[in-house]
Image (cartoon, rainbow, N blue to C red):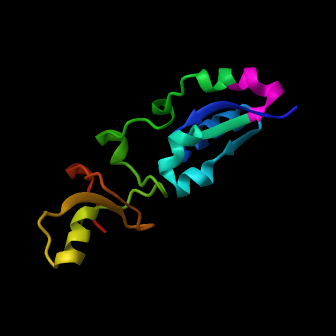
Amino acid sequence: MGWITVARYTYPYEAHIARGKLDNAGIEAFIADEHTISTHWIYSQALGGVRVQVQEESKDLALRVLAEETNVQDEFPERTEANMSCHCPRCSSTALEPALYQAKTTQVLFLLFGTTPGAQQQGTRCRSCGFFWDEALPAQTHQSA
């Protein structure tokens, strides 16, 4: 009885997703060559990728679990104006305000060259917990404090 490879991936994060699916199904899984490929990513193809391994007796069940299609859209519905405007995603507060932010690349350019070529973009900030997300708050939901 030993560990056998049931899946191979180019990137470690893909292997972790697969391992998470196996863990949810009650199958013990191990990720091999993760650190080698994280450190020396160019060797990924030469080593056969990041390997997800399970015990031999769990092989058939593991292959079935990994073959199942996962619909993430059901768990995380699309953000719409109706469900986005009501509350903060972190604390569920309704004390929201519009906020301006600059894209990360604009911030980097400012640090390097002292100037910003881009304009600020619209986002939303929660007044209760300070959480910020980069979706504009619809005009009718602005609340005064």
- Which secondary structure class fits the magenta region best? helix
Most extreme residue toward the bottom is 114
Is 56 placed left or right of 86 in the picture?
right
- Name the spot of residue 92 as percent of width and height, x first: 47, 54
Residue at position x 67%, y 44% from top? 31
Q: Using the image, determine if residue 5 lies above or below residue 84.
A: above
Q: Tell me the quarter of the picture where residue 102 sits.
A: bottom left
How many numbered dots are placed on residues in this image?
0
Q: Quadrant of the N terminus?
A: top right
- Name the spot of residue 46 as percent of width and height, x first: 54, 41
- Name the spot of residue 65 as percent of width and height, x first: 66, 25
Do we see residue 99 in this rendering?
A: no
Residue at position x 22%, y 58% from top? 122
> Which residue range is magenta in the image?
54-62
Q: Quadrant of the C terminus?
A: bottom left
Residue at position x 26%, y 70% from top? 108
Is 33 placed left or right of 42 in the picture?
right
